[in-house]
Amino acid sequence: MLPSGAAADRAGRALAFAVPVALLGGAYVGQYVFHLYPCEMCWWQRYPHFAALGLAVLGLLRPSAKGLIWLAALAIMVGGLLGLYHAGVEYGWWEGFTACTSEIKLGDDPLDAIMNAPMIRCDQVQWSLFGISLAGFNFLISVPAALLIIALLRRGDGVKR
């Protein structure tokens, strides 16, 4: 059962902060520790989580601004839906954009760095667990979390929206 009143409001705010921190943290660990470089659509999924994180921080600093947490929940939802779109492209459910990105490390010879940078295709799964890609996990985590944040805020203590 969900808490109500001020406890629900606090839980919603905490979740709105924790979800983008965890997902962005996981993305950067994957990128810099396990060398899972992001494709263009991976970056698209990160942008709403950056926005959600900023909104959640502002919402934590200004408890009277409950609308910021609502916007953070919406941004988390958008990030998750972009994950669904990307997962669909990876699994071949629908056609995606063909743009690819690469990780360029500039050193002594910038042209050599560009020419030898790994190309990351948006339609290829780099890593999966139980047949679910990282984009799929983003969807499976973000959308339910956003719905839970919204439910908690609705049960909150009526702080201004």
Image (tube, rainbow, N blue to C red):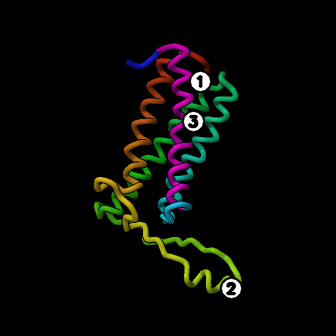
Label for residue 161?
1
Label 3 amino acid?
A: Phe
Label for residue 109?
2
Q: Position of residue 90 (x, y in %)?
A: 35, 63
The structure residue drawn at horizontal position 63% and vertical position 74%, both measured from the top left corner, is: 105
* Of pointers 2 and 3, the one earlier in the residue sequence: 3
Whether residue 40 is visible = no
Q: Position of residue 74 (x, y in %)?
A: 50, 38
Position of the N terminus, as image quadrant, is top left
Q: In this picture, is 35 found above or below 79?
A: below
Count neighbours of disc 3 (C-alpha within 10 A) and say few if under 14, some if 14 to 19, many if 20 or more: many
Q: Are marks 1 and 3 in contact (CB under 8 Å)?
A: no
Label 1 amino acid?
A: Arg
Q: Quadrant of residue 9?
A: top right
Whether residue 45 is in magenta: the answer is: no
Q: Secondary structure at mark 2?
A: loop
Label for residue 123?
none
Q: CA distance from mark 1 to mark 2?
A: 53 Å
Q: Quadrant of residue 133?
A: bottom left
The magenta-colored residue range is: 4-31
Q: In this picture, is 25 found above or below 120?
A: above
